[in-house]
Image (tube, grey):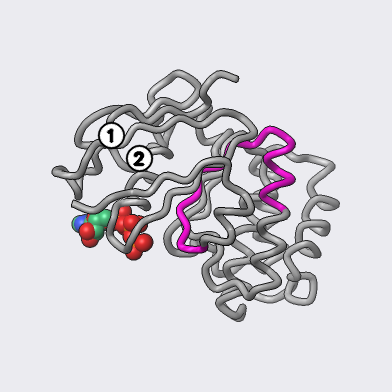
Amino acid sequence: MPDLLHLSAVTPTHLPHAAPTTLTLSPGECLALTGPNGAGKSSLLRIATGRERPATGEALFDGSPVHEDDPAARARIATVMDAPAFYPDLTVREHLMFVALAHALGDEAPGTVERILEEHHLTAQADALPSTLSSGQGQQLLLASAFTRPHDLLVLDEPEQRLDAAARDELAGRLDAHKKHGTAILMATHDHALAAAVADRVLEVGGV
Ligand SMILES: Nc1ncnc2c1ncn2[C@@H]1O[C@H](COP(=O)(O)OP(=O)(O)OP(=O)(O)O)[C@@H](O)[C@H]1O
């Protein structure tokens, strides 16, 4: 299987003296990044999505340098990263509909959104504003947004955060199912059980 993602000897800007990281990811494969706080996991994820340019090396998505503004990459890479970025005036359902329509789901959008609301236990909150959600529900909405849209690569920064034990188990099952449909997953995590359940390989990211 050809590489979908290839980071070649990259060093994050904020960690110029760190050992360069090389990694590859094929369709249907999950690579988990583990390591202590500040090791550079999130920085590598930002490089992988083109949000951050590396100090050294390069990031290739499907053979081309990845840039956040490249429409081809934007259409194929779904992310769950950093702080939530919800539209404050859209309800939970409207937010997911916006994501679905922006990614051209068309007639499939309403059905997809209702299914994903249910899978993420957000049906009862569908008409609420994101600001009224609990922190775990907010994390579910972030995940739901990523799963609503088509993607070939999922880039997840600690997707388990704020989720209870049952929701973490469901997340592991959902990620496994997406892998089986060919999604490549790059995930930073502190949850070793999640990494063991989903990842084909684990890369320990070192500090400076
Ligand atoms: N915008 C920034 N400006 C300056 N330094 C930054 C910035 N973002 C990250 N860093 C630094 O880069 C280093 C790596 O941070 P990063 O968030 O990639 O680590 P991490 O492994 O994801 O940590 P955690 O497990 O705590 O999420 C840290 O020392 C951090 O302080």
Q: Earlier in the sequence, mark 2 or mark 1?
A: 1
Circles 2, 1 touching at the beta carbon (< 8 Å) = yes
Question: What segment is highlighted magenta in the picture?
Answer: 174-191
The location of residue 189, given as percent across then percent down, is 47, 58
Q: Which residue is mark 2?
A: 47
**What amino acid type is highlighted by mark number 2?**
Ile
**Disc 1 residue crowd, few under 14, some 14–19, many 20+, Cα 10 Å:** many
Taking the spot 40% from the left edge, 33% from the top edge, the residue there is 23
x and y, in percent, of residue 72 in the image: 53, 27
- Residue 133, compared with residue 118, is above or below; it is below
Under circle 2, the secondary element is helix
Is 20 above or below relative to 79?
above
- Left or right: residue 47 versus residue 194 is left
Query: For residue 186: magenta?
Result: yes
The amino acid pointed to by label 1 is Val
Which residue is more in the foreground, 135 or 103? 135
* Disc 1: which residue: 10
On-image quarter of the N terminus: top right
Is the distance from the Cβ of mark 2 to the nearest ligand 1 atom less than 8 Å? no
